[in-house]
Amino acid sequence: MQNQVPTNIITGFLGVGKTTAILNLLKAKSDDENWAVLVNEFGEVGIDGAMMAEGGALIKEVPGGCMCCTAGVPMSVGINALLRQKPDRLIIEPTGLGHPKQVMKTLTSEQYENYIDLKATIALVDPRNLSDDRYLSNANFNDQLGVADVIIGNKIDQCSAEDIDVFNDWVTDQEPAKIFHKLVKNGALPLEILDIERRLATERSGTNHQQELHDHSDLEPVFELPPEKPFIRRENQGQGYFSCGWIVGAEHKFDFEQLFSMFSDLQAERVKAVVNTDKGCFAFNVANRVVSVNQMSLEGYESRIEVIDTELLPWEQLETILLRLCGLA
């Protein structure tokens, strides 16, 4: 590899709109550029990768928690696989519960100094969360905003004038000052912010001095649906959050109206899904009790549903409802 790949970390807490923002960037990029995206999710079933499948990028998923844990091996495996395909740009989306400092350390270590040109780290924030103690007291929330060079206040169409004032005051008070900030809606990031240079070089981790891109092919594969099973469930927990995910065979179609109603009524912090329904394939996104839906052209793809909350929910009861909505119960 002759040239370093321009790379950005796009971070932000659960439900802030990272995936939508990346999809917008993929739509805005030049058609002759080949981009790669490494997606990390707290849940086990890999929803974001499915949502990005239509964006024309090379996608690699690291589900099941923070990818920088376990000595950073899952992250390195994903990055290496993407770099071998020689992309023009690499975007890394850590889980909303991840540790951005550790991701930055890995990307600036000797292992990647010949391969990656780390640009500005971009953090998305919902301005409403800057007045909510549940977020302000969360270490990951503060770390994500603290290490970012660029701050994007997203979802301003859902914010009050007071929320906007709080965001502007917060950005003004940051020391050192952020390089760039902007208020947007629907994750409409300006494409040019990807080329902003990062403010400070991150200290090398000093723990990995590999000079080659190794395979680590003996690692456990990404969670998948076995061919003999109509569905499968996987749970995860950590950092005060619980998740449960389901993968359902593509031959089983959900009732769209009933599924939408269930997601609207579900008392959970976060719900993400890409689902085959009787009306076609749709991506569902639930944050702050608001359900957004986008049609996808992924018929034949397995349905994937992930629910995340700070409380341990009755997964068995929820599973019974989901199976009934797709004719499996």
Image: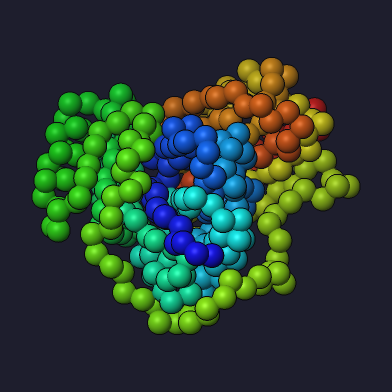
Whether residue 222 is visible:
yes
Residue 102, quarter of the rendered image: bottom left
Residue 174, compared with residue 102, is above or below; it is above
Residue 162, compared with residue 270, is above or below; it is above
- Residue placed farthest to the right in the image? 228
The location of residue 252, given as percent across then percent down, is 79, 30
Q: Nearer the viewer, residue 225 or 258?
A: 225
The location of residue 8, given as percent across then percent down, is 40, 53
Give the quadrant of the N terminus.
Answer: bottom right
Name the residue at 45% across, 36% down. Answer: 29
Left or right position of 7 against 293: left
Residue 181, compared with residue 179, is above or below; it is above
The count of marks equals: 0
Residue 128, compared with residue 222, is above or below; it is above
Left or right position of 248 against 267: right
Q: Nearer the viewer, residue 302 or 93?
A: 93
- Residue placed farthest to the front in the image? 2
The location of residue 197, given as percent across then percent down, is 28, 55
Name the residue at 47% across, 50% down. Answer: 89
Q: Nearer the viewer, residue 203 or 270?
A: 203
Name the residue at 31% across, 43% down. Answer: 193
Whether residue 78 is visible:
no
Name the residue at 26% across, 45% down. Answer: 151
Give the quadrant of the C terminus.
Answer: top right
Left or right position of 115 against 315: left
The location of residue 114, given as percent across then percent down, is 45, 70
